[in-house]
Every structure is written in structure tokens, then in C-alpha cells.
Image (spheres, grey):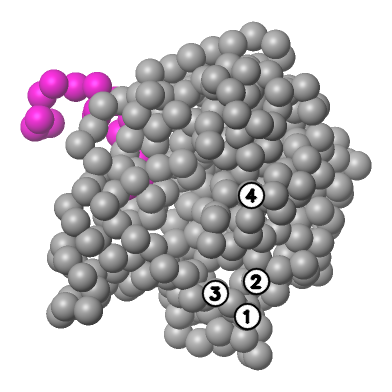
């Protein structure tokens, strides 16, 4: 690992509105306002676990952009933000149609975040980082965003900076065929690849989790991590397979759980922990994310990681 100890990431973070009660959005009397974005979620998760994170992004010259910057900066993340006066900050709206299901609608076409450029990410930030984390959401936003991701990944690899890539497929942004083609472009440059089993199948074809990890690793990464939700996780690291059970919880909102998992894994990697401990922390952070409405608000701090292991409901 580099002497530098910050993780750099970038992508689109949007304003987030969600109904305060279960039912059709058309009948909601109040909405809560917050923010959410995969890469900034990871940055916040890392920061809460004691690892310095730097997030680069692009927002509109509007109040929602101000909200995005303020919220991420308030978590201690080093925010490097570009303000676009010609495009709005993106918006997503969550509708909890039943107590156990929800729908997320995105209003991000032509948004400021989708127009992220290579010049929005200082080259020295990449070359001095311990690790660059990118998501498969970014290249789906626009050709310009795809070019920015490729620039950052290629710059990192040229300068021996580790690259982490979360496939993070979004079906409302692009087709599995287009996503799979991009995955094959990026995976060989990555040192660590994160994927749900369904996402991994888009990249390398259907199969059991261990076989999916082996196919991903065959493309170049030394670490292939398959996120399995309630079934835990599996990782193939330098040819050795590791498994970790999930932490059982009564989930309130699973959005952001994958980002929390990635943050937990990377935080332990940066601080020098072994594979099994990385997975243990990752499944714990993922479980915490499910306990609170919102994308990142439930992410734990390091001293809280043992809470889900205790049987005593009150700490005094």
C-alpha cells in the first residue's frame, strides 16, 4: 500500500427525496430531503471508519448542489466539487409502496453530475492516493463521464495506484450488453472488483458465486469480491477463497448497503487487515446500512462495529 493513506473516489451525488410514510407517493403529505450517491456513500463510510476519503463531483449552481456539498463535507470527507451554472443537480425520489418494497426514480438526464470531466479530477489527487475507487454507474451517465472514468483508471494504473471497481449495474441507465462491454474494458485495470452475483453474471456469464469470482479474477484483478446480501459474501484473493456469513438484521432500507460493504472492506484493506477481517467488517457495515432509511445515514463508526454482536439492548 502507498505511503499516502487517502482513498479517492468520484461520481454523481444527487439530492434525495423520500416519503415519510408507506404508500403511493401521490398521497404522501410530507417528503424528507437528503442526498445520495454510490461513490460519496463509500467516501462517507470510509471516513466514519477512520480512513481519509476524497470525493470529486459536479453539481448545479442551485440549492440542491449546496446541500450535496454541505452534507458530504460535514462528514469530514475532503470535497473537491465543480459547480456547473448551466445544468441542474440531479434528483432521486424514493417511494415505499409497501412496508417491504420501495421504488427509486431518478431525474438525472442532463444533470451537472453526468457532465463530469477529466479536468474535474486533479491528476495529482490520483497519483498521490493509496487507492482509487470507481463505480460502474459513472460510465453509464454519459460518454463524457465514461471518458472521465477511463482517464482516472488509466492514470492510477500508470502510477501504480490500486484501483477498486464496483460494477454497480443500474438497469434504468443502460442495457446489460452495454454494461458488460464496459466491464470488460475496466476489469483488467482493477486490482479489486466488487459485484453482486447478478452483476457479475453480466460481466462473465451466469454461475455459482465462486465460479463468478474465478472468472473475474481470470481477467486480471487479484481480488474478486461477490456480495451476496443476506447470504453474506465470498472473495477470491490471490487464488484463495474466503467466505463470510451475513449479520442478520430486520432490514428497513437496503439502498446503500452495497456501498457500506465496499467502504468496510476498503477501510480494513487500507489499514492492513487480512481478507477474513475485511469481509467481517464489510458484512457488518452493510448490515448497519439496512437499519436506517436513507442511503448512508446508518453507516457505523469504528467504535460501533460490535453493536450488532451484543445481546444487551442497552449500553450504560
Classed neighbour count for the residue bearing mark 1: other residues with Cα under 10 Å, few (<14), some (14–19), many (≥20): some
Query: Contact, CB < 8 Å: mark 3 with mark 1?
Result: yes
Most extreme residue toward the bottom is: 86
Image: 71 above or below 227: below
Instruction: Judge from the rendering whether residue 108 lies leftward or rightward of residue 156; answer left or right.
Output: left
What's the magenta bit mostly, secondary-structure-wise?
Answer: loop
Instruction: Judge from the rendering whether residue 185 lies leftward or rightward of residue 291; answer left or right.
Output: right
In the picture, the disc for residue 110 is: 1
Tag 2 residue? 114
Q: Considering depth in this image, is 138 or 156 the residue closer to the camera?
A: 138
Q: Residue at x 43, y 17 (%)?
A: 244
Tag 3 residue? 108
Label 2, label 1: how far apart the Cα atoms are: 7 Å
Q: Is residue 292 visible?
A: no
Label 4, label 1: how far apart the Cα atoms are: 22 Å
Most extreme residue toward the right is: 158
Which label sits in the foreground, 4 or 2?
A: 4
Which residues make up the magenta segment?
Answer: 298-316
Please report whichever mark, 4 or 3, sits nearer to the chain's N-terminal start.
3
In the picture, the disc for residue 93 is: none
In the picture, the disc for residue 176 is: 4
Label 3, label 1: how far apart the Cα atoms are: 6 Å
Query: Contact, CB < 8 Å: mark 3 with mark 2?
Result: yes
Quarter of the picture containing the C terminus is top left
Classed neighbour count for the residue bearing mark 3: other residues with Cα under 10 Å, few (<14), some (14–19), many (≥20): some
Q: Residue at x 53, y 37 (%)?
A: 198
Query: Contact, CB < 8 Å: mark 2 with mark 1?
Result: yes
Amino acid at each position: 500500500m502507498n505511503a499516502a493513506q487517502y482513498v479517492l473516489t468520484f461520481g454523481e451525488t444527487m439530492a434525495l427525496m423520500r416519503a415519510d410514510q408507506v404508500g403511493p407517493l401521490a398521497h404522501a403529505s410530507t417528503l424528507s430531503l437528503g442526498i445520495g450517491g454510490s461513490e460519496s456513500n463509500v467516501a462517507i463510510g470510509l471516513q466514519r471508519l477512520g480512513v481519509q476519503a476524497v470525493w470529486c463531483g459536479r453539481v448545479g449552481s442551485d440549492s440542491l448542489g449546496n446541500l450535496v456539498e454541505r452534507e458530504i463535507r460535514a462528514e469530514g470527507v475532503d470535497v473537491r466539487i465543480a459547480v456547473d451554472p448551466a445544468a441542474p443537480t440531479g434528483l432521486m425520489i424514493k417511494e415505499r409502496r409497501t412496508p417491504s418494497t420501495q421504488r427509486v426514480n431518478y431525474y438525472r438526464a442532463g444533470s451537472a453530475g453526468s457532465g463530469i470531466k477529466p479536468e474535474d479530477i486533479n491528476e495529482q489527487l490520483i497519483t498521490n492516493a493509496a487507492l482509487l475507487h470507481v463505480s460502474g454507474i459513472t460510465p453509464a451517465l454519459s460518454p463524457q463521464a465514461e471518458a472521465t472514468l477511463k482517464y482516472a483508471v488509466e492514470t492510477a494504473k500508470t502510477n501504480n495506484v490500486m484501483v477498486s471497481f464496483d460494477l454497480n449495474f443500474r438497469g434504468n441507465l443502460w442495457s446489460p450488453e452495454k454494461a458488460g462491454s464496459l466491464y470488460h474494458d475496466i476489469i483488467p485495470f482493477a486490482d479489486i472488483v466488487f459485484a453482486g452475483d447478478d452483476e457479475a453474471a453480466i460481466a462473465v456469464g451466469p454461475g455459482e458465486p465462486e465460479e463468478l469470482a474465478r472468472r473475474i479474477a481470470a481477467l486480471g484483478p487479484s481480488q474478486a469480491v461477490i456480495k451476496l446480501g443476506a447470504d453474506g459474501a465470498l472473495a477470491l484473493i490471490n487464488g484463495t477463497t474466503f467466505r463470510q456469513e451475513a449479520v442478520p438484521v430486520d432490514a428497513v432500507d437496503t439502498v446503500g448497503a452495497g456501498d457500506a460493504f465496499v467502504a468496510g472492506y476498503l477501510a480494513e484493506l487500507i489499514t492492513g487487515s487480512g481478507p477474513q477481517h475485511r469481509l467481517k467488517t464489510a458484512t457488518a457495515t452493510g448490515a448497519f446500512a439496512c437499519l436506517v432509511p436513507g442511503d448512508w445515514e446508518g453507516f457505523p463508526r469504528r467504535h460501533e462495529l460490535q453493536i450488532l454482536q451484543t445481546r444487551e439492548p442497552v449500553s450504560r
